[in-house]
Image (cartoon, grey):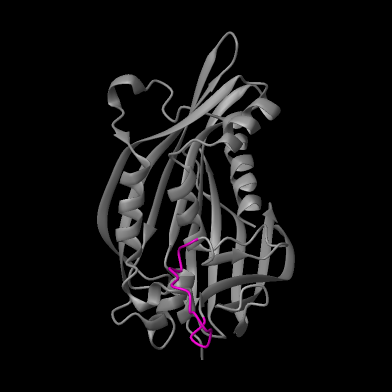
Amino acid sequence: MMKLRNLLLSALAITAVATTSCINRDEDTSENEKPTTAADLATVLDEAWVYSDAKSSPLEMKVGEFALFHTTQQLETQQPRLYMQEGINLMKIEVKPDTEEPEYLKHTYTFAYETAIYTGDNAQQSTKEQGRAYYTKNPQAATPAVLNLLGPKGLHLMADDIKMELGYEKLLGLAMYSCTNSEELVKACQEQLGAETCSRACTNLETSDEVVNAPESMRSQPNCGGLSDCKIHQKRIKFNSTLTVKYKNMTETQKVNYSFAVSPDLPYLARMPEFCVRALASYNSGKFLVTNCVKLANYRPAP
């Protein structure tokens, strides 16, 4: 399944290559960009997620937890418009030894994934089951395995799971792919863009601490969704990821800006309350600055 995720992320990266350019039209990137390594980004992401906190673990999720996210799209300086709503409700948890590797316990989570995609005032709605499987060592096994949940066996996306993406999975994708190069990326560039090669690099990593109001739907709950003061303390992380695409007779660079927040106040399902991507998109022979943001609209703990 990791191979499927690699290919999916490569495909997403190529989409960015085909449609985006430098964020600021008149920006001189040669002098203003401060290099950021993959290790730099991974360190910041690790610190923001706070793995020592029990709430950061998927194993702390409980049946009945619910999170609602709104995706907005903003063109240039226009007001953001609601593009999609995503409701994620944990319906079932099963824990049993893995049939292939009994030294592991397989924790299977089944979600109801509800979406509403808006075209104007009309919404196309759908509901489907989505699954996740997490693995831990089996204490009953003859030789229990020592496992970090973040390792290769720690997270498994079910085979039919393409659309639903939890906050931690966005974080994992950023750490693994946004600042690094791979054979899959080069192959995708060659096959889909006809390029000789391409490479990816990150710049301008910034972090800051913020305190923001909880979403209105959480504030209306008796316990504010588990927040004592209806405030969310979060770490804001920003950086640029630039793809350099080389053809026989020219070289193009395309940059995407990421800005997102991770909060230790919130549990695994809602721990990334905001995830924004900004880039220039080509449309009808013009280029327009587009910002897509996924924001937490509500979180409700298990009953």
Picture quadrant where residue 99 is located: bottom right
Report if residue 150 lies within the magenta region: yes
Q: Is 161 displayed left or right of 237 in the figure?
A: right
Whole-percent x and y of residue 137? 49, 78
Front position in the image: 22 or 30: 30
Q: Answer whether residue 102 is visible to the viewer in this image.
A: yes
Front position in the image: 102 or 180: 102
Identify the residue at the far left of this view.
Answer: 209
Whole-percent x and y of residue 27? 37, 22
* Residue at x-position 57% and y-position 38%: 13
Q: Quadrant of the N terminus?
A: bottom right
Is residue 211 shown above or below 194?
Answer: below
Identify the residue at the far bottom of this view.
Answer: 303
Q: Is 17 displayed left or right of 277 in the figure?
A: right
Is residue 124 shown above or below 29?
Answer: below
Is residue 195 shown above or below 212?
Answer: above
Tell me which secondary structure the magenta stretch mostly adopts.
loop
Whole-percent x and y of residue 83? 61, 53
Q: Answer whether residue 28 is visible to the viewer in this image.
A: no
Q: Could you tell me how many numbered marks the image carries?
A: 0
Whole-percent x and y of residue 145? 48, 74
Picture quadrant where residue 133 is located: bottom right
Numbered range of the magenta stretch: 138-151
* Residue at x-position 64% and y-position 41%: 11
* Residue at x-position 43% and y-position 77%: 218
Front position in the image: 184 or 67: 184
Report if residue 227 lies within the magenta region: no
* Residue at x-position 51% and y-position 87%: 302
Identify the residue at the far top of this view.
Answer: 249
